[in-house]
Amino acid sequence: MRIRATVTAACLAAVLAVSGCAPAGDRYGLAADTDRGSGDVELTACAVDDQLHWPAATVRITNHSATTSNYVVQIAFLDGAGRQVTEGVAAASSLAPAQDTLQQAQGTADPKGPVSCRVVDIARYATP
């Protein structure tokens, strides 16, 4: 299970390194859609891993735009009291119009009980 956590952390670092930093209006240094893909993301699962004790969320990303796009989806994991315990990121690249994919966002903290998940931010930008 530690391998999965290491791979998840490495993938997150790669996504952040590729996306870079920019102001919120142009978060990834590329022209983002004005609706930011809000209708393109569906939370399909949210649970705490029995062995790792970290929360994970599965999201279905469907490209409803007319161009091949990349997505970065930020998920917040909340404890029973509604407090944020940790965050995770799911990403998809080069998703063709009408194509969908299931991606996982992994948290990195033990919530000490059940969690709920909430989509915090969605960035969709056309593939260069």
Image (spheres, rainbow, N blue to C red):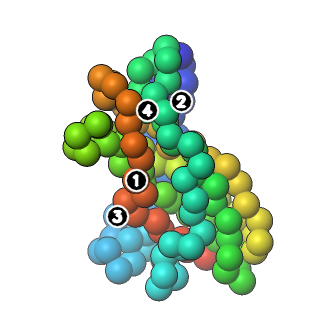
Above or below: residue 3 compared with residue 56: above
Q: Disc 4 or 3, which lies upstream in sequence?
A: 3
Q: Earlier in the sequence, mark 1 or mark 2?
A: 2
Residue 51 vertical position relative to residue 128 in the rendered view, above or below: above
Task: Tell me if label 1 and label 2 are in contact, CB under 8 Å.
Answer: no
All told, the count of numbered labels is: 4
Q: Amino acid at mark 2?
A: Val
Residue at 56% across, 73% down: 39
Within-10-Å neighbours for mark 1: few <14, some 14–19, many 20+? some
**What is the C-alpha distance between the residues marked 1 and 4?**
12 Å
Q: Position of residue 126 (x, y in %)?
A: 61, 76
Q: Position of residue 58 (x, y in %)?
A: 57, 44
Task: State the separation of the CA atoms marked 3 and 1.
Answer: 23 Å
Q: Are marks 1 and 4 in contact (CB under 8 Å)?
A: no
Spatial CA distance of label 1 from label 2 is 23 Å
Nearest to viewer (mark 2 / mark 4): 4
Three-letter amino acid code of the residue under disc 4: Pro
Q: Which mark is residue 21?
A: 3
